[in-house]
Image (cartoon, rainbow, N blue to C red):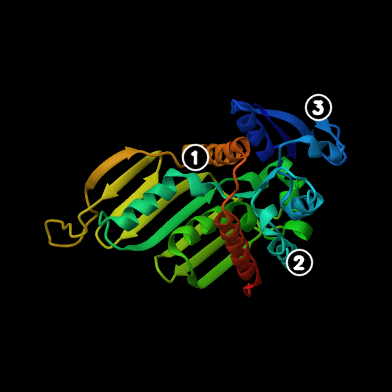
């Protein structure tokens, strides 16, 4: 048996998903849909009704169209894989909340850090005493997309539909990850900016989240500076640094120089850890998780849907904060 897949979207992230679908041994990409453009691919179509002949549909279109397409697929009996965010307005969010359980059991929202080594690492250090209590997780993930010509003419730069684009496209993955591990947060600080002056949506933001049952998490994301991808986890007994394709554990905490003053702890252990590879692999894991459910005709557990809505709801609370 081979399952037939339809995909909404045709470039950028959609191309990554096309590659992963084609890589899966039990799937066939049947259609690539766009509402108006002629796609240079034999599988391209402008006929939305063609998607109803598929076993599953992947929504990889601009953020502000996700709920729109879920609504258009209301009578579709197959499975739906939808990229994050699930929705970009309270009106859309309320529509998703009203979807019946039977339909929810076939809808999967892609927050792929749920399937990552990074998630496994956080779970491990929470359940062991390797670095003691987790005090702070500091994330920096940046690059210079906002200065590229393709950005200015893209939906990402359009503040009318996607003002908080970088929050909803990039930061949301980290927010979802930490909600998964640390549950509710107490306080949030959010500072978005347009640095590049290209487009009208925010291309940079800084976010601080204080969790009730966990650390203070700081997230800096930007499309307006050089490439950086690093995470530092501060514990009461040690520090974990993930950058330059390495994960380094530094301890013991009480390390002193010859004058008896604190100094940087020595390297306790070191191993290969590429955050970029982990992101790509976790995306593949997420897609495979979905496709295997489709192949086996299994229900998607309601907790997946509920957790996605919790993350989406927190995004709205962040967007409402006084800037």
Lower position in the chain sequence, tag 2 or tag 1: 2
Q: Which mark is residue 40?
A: 3
Count residues near mark 2 (Cα–Cα under 10 Å), then give few for <14, some for 14-19, many for 20+.
few
Q: Which mark is residue 56?
A: none
Q: Nearer the viewer, residue 51 or 294?
A: 294
Count residues near mark 3 (Cα–Cα under 10 Å), then give few for <14, some for 14-19, many for 20+.
few
Q: Is residue 83 left or right of residue 122?
A: right
Q: Marks 2 and 1: which is nearer the front?
A: 2
Res. 16 image quadrant: top right
Q: Secondary structure at mark 2?
A: helix
Q: Position of residue 97 (x, y in %)?
A: 68, 64
Res. 24 image quadrant: top right
Q: Is residue 149 above or below residue 233?
A: above
Q: Where does label 2 land, which residue?
A: 91
Q: Where does label 1 land, which residue?
A: 276
Which residue shows up at 74% across the image and 48% down it?
A: 62
Lower position in the chain sequence, tag 1 or tag 3: 3
Q: Position of residue 3 (x, y in %)?
A: 67, 31
Q: Is residue 130 left or right of residue 118?
A: left
Q: Nearer the viewer, residue 128 or 149?
A: 128
Q: Secondary structure at mark 3?
A: loop
Q: Position of residue 193 (x, y in %)?
A: 63, 62
For the C terminus, the quadrant is: bottom right
């Amino acid at each position: 048996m081979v399952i037939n897949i339809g995909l909404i979207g045709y470039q950028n992230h959609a191309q990554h998903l096309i590659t992963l679908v084609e890589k899966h041994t039990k799937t066939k990409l049947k259609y690539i849909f766009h509402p108006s453009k002629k796609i240079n691919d034999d599988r391209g179509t402008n006929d939305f009704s063609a998607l109803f002949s598929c076993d599953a549909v992947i929504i990889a279109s601009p953020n502000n169209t996700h709920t729109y397409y879920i609504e258009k697929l209301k009578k579709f009996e197959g499975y739906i894989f939808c990229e994050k965010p699930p929705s970009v307005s309270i009106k859309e969010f309320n529509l998703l909340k009203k979807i019946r359980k039977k339909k929810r059991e076939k809808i999967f929202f892609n927050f792929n850090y749920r399937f990552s080594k990074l998630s496994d690492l956080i779970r491990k250090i929470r359940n062991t005493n390797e670095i003691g209590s987790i005090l702070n997780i500091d994330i920096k993930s940046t690059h210079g997309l906002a200065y590229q010509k393709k950005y200015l003419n893209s939906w990402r730069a359009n503040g009318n539909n996607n003002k908080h684009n970088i929050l909803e496209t990039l930061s949301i993955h980290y927010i979802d990850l930490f909600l998964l591990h640390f549950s509710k947060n107490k306080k949030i600080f959010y500072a978005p900016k347009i640095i590049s002056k290209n487009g009208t949506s925010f291309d940079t933001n800084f976010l601080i989240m204080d969790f009730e049952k966990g650390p203070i998490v700081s997230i800096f994301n930007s499309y307006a500076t050089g490439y950086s991808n690093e995470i530092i986890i501060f514990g009461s007994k040690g520090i974990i640094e993930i950058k330059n394709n390495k994960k380094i554990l530094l301890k013991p905490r009480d390390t002193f120089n010859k004058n008896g003053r604190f100094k940087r702890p020595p390297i306790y252990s070191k191993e290969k850890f590429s955050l970029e590879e982990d992101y790509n692999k976790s995306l593949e894991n997420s897609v495979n998780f979905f496709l295997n459910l489709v192949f086996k005709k299994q229900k998607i557990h309601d907790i997946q849907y509920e957790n996605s809505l919790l993350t989406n709801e927190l995004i709205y609370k962040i967007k409402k904060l006084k800037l």
